[in-house]
């Protein structure tokens, strides 16, 4: 694997984040878990923690994030930032929008935290926070498939960045996304999600799709509101979905059950 560009990333980010550091680890259970452990122990400085391999990577709703056996095939990192803001709604969408803007125009976003290529999952986002005094420490975890993965055990077929850029590698991808991601999060603390809504709608992987919710209901995806909540046109009317406990997936034409509206 090529040398990780830790110094270049630090030089690009440190002027905006005093005390920022970059750590590259050969293996760890989960970069998110490690930064949350540190935060519970009072370590809340801004940091980028990268793992060549995760042994217990985590996704949303407690799902496991499959780690590639070959570290050249995936990029996994967590960005820890002490943040002050009153409304966190839409942060995962802002993070996802920054990532796809940095990576490739063909990528889209599946609400609330997945990067998609042609209906297949290329990456995911997991955000966790911990209140510390007058602020929260946010841990933004990201996993991106760089090369081909075996689809075994995955609910969604995988995609990978080398389909779009055959020369892609984890280190250069990291350098491509981190400076813009830091700026996007800092801007979000001041402006929230509303200014990003139209940009998200241009990347919305669920636009006008029939979707199935984990509560058993279904409907037609109708974009997001200014706070980043998903809008679903259901039989009973327009529903606003903002719960972190609700899972959304495209509804297959062969699925049985009540017909969706729209």
Image (cartoon, rainbow, N blue to C red):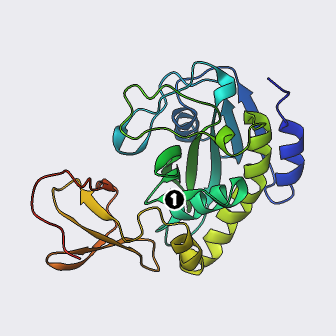
Residue extending farthest to the front is: 254
Image quarter of the C terminus: bottom left
Q: Is residue 193 visible?
A: no
Q: Residue furthest left?
A: 258
Whether 208 is drawn above or below 256: the answer is below
Residue 257 at x, y = what percent? 9, 56
x and y percent of residue 221 in the render? 34, 70
Residue 187 placement (x, y as % from top left): 68, 70
Look at the image and tell me whether residue 254 can be seen: yes
Say which residue label 1 marks.
109
Left-right relation of 15 to 57: right
Residue depicted at 30% across the width and 53% down the height: 247
Corner quadrant of residue 202: bottom right
Q: Judge from the rendering whether residue 183 lies leftward or rightward of residue 135; answer left or right.
A: right
- Screen quadrant of the N terminus: top right
In this picture, is 233 found above or below 139?
Answer: below
Image location (x, y in percent) of residue 158: 49, 38
Per the image, label 1 sits on a secondary structure element best described as strand
């Amino acid at each position: 694997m090529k040398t990780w560009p830790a110094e270049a990333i630090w030089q690009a980010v440190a002027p905006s984040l005093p005390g920022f550091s970059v750590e590259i680890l050969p293996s760890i259970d989960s970069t998110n878990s490690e930064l949350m452990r540190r935060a519970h122990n009072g370590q809340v400085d801004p940091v980028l923690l990268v793992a060549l391999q995760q042994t217990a990577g985590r996704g949303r709703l407690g799902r496991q994030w499959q780690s590639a056996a070959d570290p050249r095939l995936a990029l996994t990192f967590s960005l820890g930032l002490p943040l002050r803001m009153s409304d966190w709604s839409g942060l995962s969408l802002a993070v996802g929008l920054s990532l796809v803007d940095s990576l490739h125009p063909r990528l889209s976003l599946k609400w609330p935290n997945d990067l998609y290529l042609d209906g297949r999952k290329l990456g995911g986002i997991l955000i966790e926070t911990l209140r510390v005094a007058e602020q929260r420490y946010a841990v933004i975890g990201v996993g991106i498939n760089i090369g081909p993965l075996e689809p075994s055990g995955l609910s969604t077929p995988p995609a990978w960045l080398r389909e779009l850029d055959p020369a892609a590698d984890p280190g250069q991808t990291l350098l491509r996304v981190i400076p813009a991601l830091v700026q996007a999060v800092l801007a979000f603390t001041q402006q929230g999600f509303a200014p990003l809504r139209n940009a998200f709608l241009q990347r919305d992987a669920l636009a006008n799709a029939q979707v199935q919710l984990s509560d058993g209901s279904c409907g037609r995806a109708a974009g997001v509101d200014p706070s980043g909540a998903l809008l679903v046109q259901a039989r009973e009317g327009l529903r606003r979905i903002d719960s972190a406990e609700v899972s959304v997936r495209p509804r297959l034409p062969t699925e049985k059950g009540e017909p969706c509206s729209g």
